[in-house]
Amino acid sequence: MTKIGGDFTLVLPWGRLGLILAVAVAVLAALAASVLPARRALARPVVEALGAE
């Protein structure tokens, strides 16, 4: 709860905002964990990748 001026009080649901922020960070981490290896795999020719195994 924050008093801004006079009788006006700002009430923020900090628990819910924290949950939304945590979910957003988790989604960004999942995207980074899936997109970065996929981009690296696309940069290598398929025949060369199969020959390396």
Image (tube, rainbow, N blue to C red):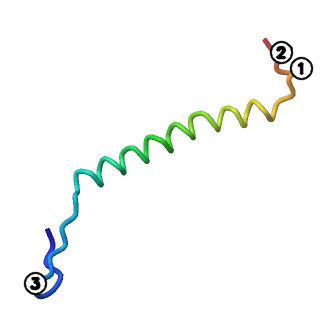
Quadrant (top left, top right, bottom left, bottom right) of the C terminus = top right
Q: Amino acid at mark 3?
A: Asp
* Secondary structure under the numbered disc 2 in the rendered image: helix
CA distance for labels 1 and 3: 71 Å
Who comes first in sequence, dot 1 or dot 3? Answer: 3
Amino acid type at image mark 1? Val
Q: Nearer the viewer, mark 1 or mark 3?
A: 3
User: Which residue was labeled with disc 3?
Assistant: 7
Q: Residues within 10 Å of mark 2 (few under 14, many from 20)?
A: few
Q: Quadrant of residue 4?
A: bottom left
Whether pointer 1 and pointer 3 mark residues with C-beta atoms closer than 8 Å, the reply is no
Specify whether 22 is left or right of 35: left
Residue 32, numbered circle: none
Label 3 element class: loop
Instruction: Residue 35: name its quadrant.
Output: top right
Which residue is denoted by mark 1 in the rendering?
47
Asked if disc 2 and disc 3 are in contact, CB closer than 8 Å, the reply is no
Q: Is residue 41 above or below residue 22?
A: above
List x then y, in percent, for residue 27: 48, 42
The residue depicted at 56 percent of the width and 35 percent of the height is 33
Name which residue type carries label 2.
Answer: Leu
> For the view shown, which residue lies furthest in the bottom direction?
6
Please name the residue that numbered disc 2 is placed on. Answer: 50
Q: Residues within 10 Å of mark 3 (few under 14, many from 20)?
A: few
Number of residue marks: 3
| Image location of residue 34, percent across then percent down | 60, 33
Please name whichever residue, 30 or 5, is drawn nearer the observer in this view of the structure.
5
